[in-house]
Amino acid sequence: LQQRGHVVTRIDPIDFVLLEKPHFAYPPGKAPLKLQEVHEILKEADGYVCVTPEYNHSPSPALLNTLNHFGSSTFSFKPSAIVTYSAGQWGGTRAAVALRTTLSELGCLPVSAMIHIPKAQEVLDRDGNIIANTSTA
């Protein structure tokens, strides 16, 4: 996306302390600073690309926790894409289906095409880079 001139902002749930109270439950301007910063990023975004591993046929609990802390007006009518990965042969397909429902409920417009990466440990290194000489067979 960056190579095509888009601004990409990565939001990682690991950057948060346990989210105990959603952004929309605070009076305006009273949310913790990190929560307010993420709200502004989400509100200003033109769209979203959600990347998640598959856990128990579901999206990452950390991703769901993060998304659920912002009201639907934050996401309304913005396109969203889903990228999933897993160690198994389906590449997180079941997680993608579950995430699509959550994104729709938040007001996003999920695009119909999704990207699934099966056997991610054979395709990506620890930093998420594509491993050279990866066979497509």
Image (cartoon, rainbow, N blue to C red):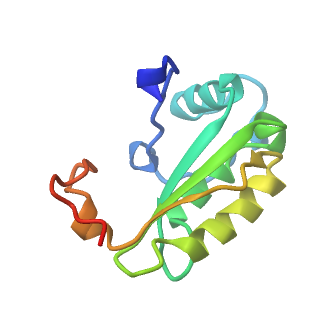
Name which residue lies at 51% across and 82% down.
56
Give the residue drawn at x 78%, y 45%: 108
Residue at screen point 51% across, 31% down:
34
Count of marks, rendered view: 0
Is 127 or 34 nearer to us in this picture?
127
Residue nearest the observer in this picture, 95 or 62 = 95
Q: Quadrant of residue 78?
A: top right
**45 over 134 or under it: above or below:** above
Q: Write the residue at 60% across / 59% down.
A: 64
- Image quadrant in which you'd find residue 35: top right
In the picture, measured across the screen, residue 116 lies left or right of residue 134, that is right
* Side of 25 where 51 appears, left or right: left
99 versus 118 height, above or below: above
Residue 23: x and y, percent?
69, 40
Q: Residue furthest front?
A: 137
Task: Tell me if 6 is positioned left or right of 73 in this view.
Answer: left
| Front-most of residues 126 and 122 | 122
Q: Residue furthest left?
A: 133
* x and y, in percent, of residue 63 in the image: 54, 56
Question: In x, y percent, where is residue 94?
Answer: 59, 76
Residue sticking out furthest to the top:
5
Whole-percent x and y of residue 103? 73, 54
Quarter of the picture holding the C terminus: bottom left
